[in-house]
Image: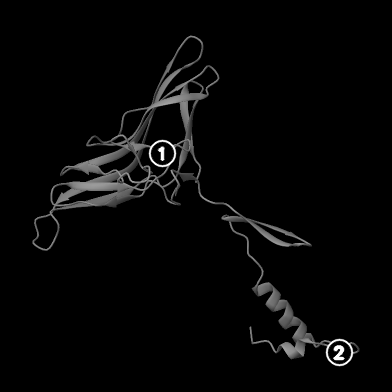
Amino acid sequence: MSSINWNNLKASPNGFVLGSSYNNLIDLIRSIEIASSPDYNINRNLGGTKLNINFPPVHHGTPITPFPFMLTDVSDADSGKVTVSPGTYNNIPPMIGGVELIPPHGTPIPILTLDYNSYVVYVHYSFSFDSSGNITGYSTREILATDSSSPPSNAVSLATDGSGTADFYETISFVGVNDVTLVDAPPYTVDIFQNIKSSQTFSVCGGGISHQITS
């Protein structure tokens, strides 16, 4: 759009507006219009325009990242190591070694240490539920690694009243730890093949476990 001569946009009380000037005005208004986005909601009325911003969920004062469960190589001379950016299941972050992925202020970010091998990195939530299927507590919520081809299978144990306990597992990444002996390379590097990048929910349904992506 060409630059606008504001003086040309001012019409005298008895004058007229050129079509080109009017079109420039429309183009200007369109250029400053707020476009829609999944990150916010637009509310327009005679009093003006308001943006309702959809802030990401926060845990311990730290926003949960848009691409949760992203693994990062932080290997050193001793072993392969990865950190995991914080995602959630049922809005609750898992742990590594008993430390939440979003640790309290002053607590170091937990690290998953891996030896030279290939791994499946997975999440394990063990929980209890009442007779209506509502989750009443979690006894385990850990990110683990196994050199097997897959994590254990989901399992549900029901009591006679319909309450019970369950174990939920899901692969979040495939990791290969390389023992590098080149002079200019670190002794260990990690190849990461991302699987799950989304926060999830899970629940007991029909004697089994169902889950879905939430972000």
Q: Look at mark 1 in the image and give the residue it sits on.
A: 93
Q: Secondary structure at mark 2?
A: loop
Say few, some or many: other residues with alpha carbon within 10 Å of mark 1 (under 14 / 14 to 19 / 20 or more): many
Q: Residue at the right extreme?
A: 14
Which one is earlier in the sequence, the residue at label 1 or at label 2?
Answer: 2
Specify whether 20 is left or right of 162.
right
- 45 or 68: nearer the viewer: 45
The disc label shown at residue 153, or none: none
Specify whether 53 is left or right of 63.
right
Residue 47: x and y in percent read: 77, 62
Residue 145: x and y in percent read: 26, 37
Q: Secondary structure at mark 1?
A: loop
> Mark 2: which amino acid?
Ser
Image vertical order of residue 107 relative to residue 13, above or below: above
- 203 or 55: nearer the viewer: 55
How many numbered discs?
A: 2
Specify whether 118 is left or right of 108.
left
- 105 or 110: nearer the viewer: 105
Quadrant of res 171: top left
Residue ID at (43%, 43%): 60
Residue 161: x and y in percent read: 51, 10
Image vertical order of residue 189 relative to residue 99, above or below: below
Residue ID at (80%, 88%): 18
Quadrant of res 186: bottom left
Residue 50: x and y in percent read: 68, 59
Quadrant of res 170: top left
Image vertical order of residue 74 relative to residue 210, above or below: below
> Mark 1: which amino acid?
Pro
Q: Look at mark 2 in the image and give the residue it sits on.
A: 12
Q: CA distance from mark 1 to mark 2?
A: 65 Å
